[in-house]
Image (cartoon, helix red, strand yellow):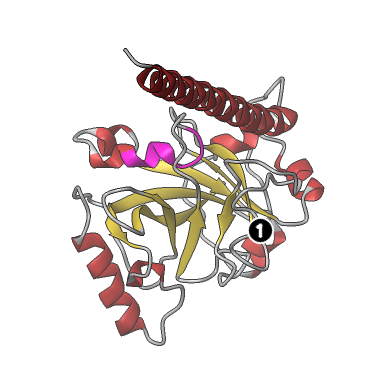
Amino acid sequence: MNKTVKLLLVIVSGILVGIMIYSAYNIIEDKVVHSEARSKDNQVVESYVIQNPVSPTPRVYEEQVTNQILLDDEVSPLNSMVDLSKFFADYKDAVAWIYSPDTKINYGVVEAEDNDFYLHRAMDGSYSISGSLFVDCNNKRDFSDENTVIYGHHMNDGTKFASIMGYRENGYYAQHPVLYLSTPDMNYRVEVFSAYLTDADSDTYTFRFSSTQEYAAWLQRMRSQSDFQTDVMLSTSDRVITLSTCSYEYTDARYVVQGKLVPIH
């Protein structure tokens, strides 16, 4: 073997070793960054967890009397799980807390003046690769729009909104028919009625409608696209939330889960 061939082999070997070292470094760094993000999320949740919960009691608001809101006969589990008053007081951008039983979805929800701010920021504004769950900046902060959209990353470790992909599987909806959402003014049961793959610019991301007829037609389209069928009753007096996360079947694919907000105690 001549010197030129030996030199080439040494160079190629060196390049391969360098690639392996670089790849290993990136893998380790990625795991560290994701671990830090999970740790930060866990710290936030744990800081508001009620350590010695008592039996759930209804949260009472003057608005319920003033607006004659009829509450469904259920007490939100969040009442005894999370110190919601403290959470909303601590974060100026906090608009809700969302919880999906038997999943990793148990997070505060924020809203900024644009949809980029919380993509890679924790609720305190510090960097986080997994970002925060956030409401579209075009939505009202009180969930009074016909359709309020909440975005969350599809993290490989199953955190943020990764678990909503489960609605694609047979039987998952039967085990997860509802979520719970609390705002500063109200508790809600979220009755899931649809989940499907869509485009990032589809009419799924319509927030308000010019007429009840337009809204009724939209509700029918949303339900017709679902990966499963439900018995959830819908009317134009209902308000909807749409949970949205990235999917990877094609460019700008999104998987969404939609549910109607039912006021509860």
Frontmost residue, 119 versus 18? 18
Pointer 1 local density, CA inside 10 Å: few below 14, some 14–19, many at least 20: some
- Residue 261 location (% of width, % of height): 45, 56
- Residue 96 location (% of width, % of height): 62, 51
Q: Residue furthest bottom?
A: 210
Frontmost residue, 167 versus 9? 9
Frontmost residue, 153 versus 263? 153
- Residue 151 location (% of width, % of height): 50, 54
Task: Work out whether 40 lies above or below 52.
Answer: below
Residue range in magenta is 159-165
The residue under the point 44% across, 42% down is 154
Q: Which residue is mark 1?
A: 117
Answer whether residue 13 is visible to the viewer in this image: yes
Please tell me whether residue 50 belongs to the stretch shown in magenta: no
Task: Work out whether 186 lies above or below 57.
Answer: below
Answer whether residue 81 is visible to the viewer in this image: no
The residue under the point 62% across, 42% down is 58
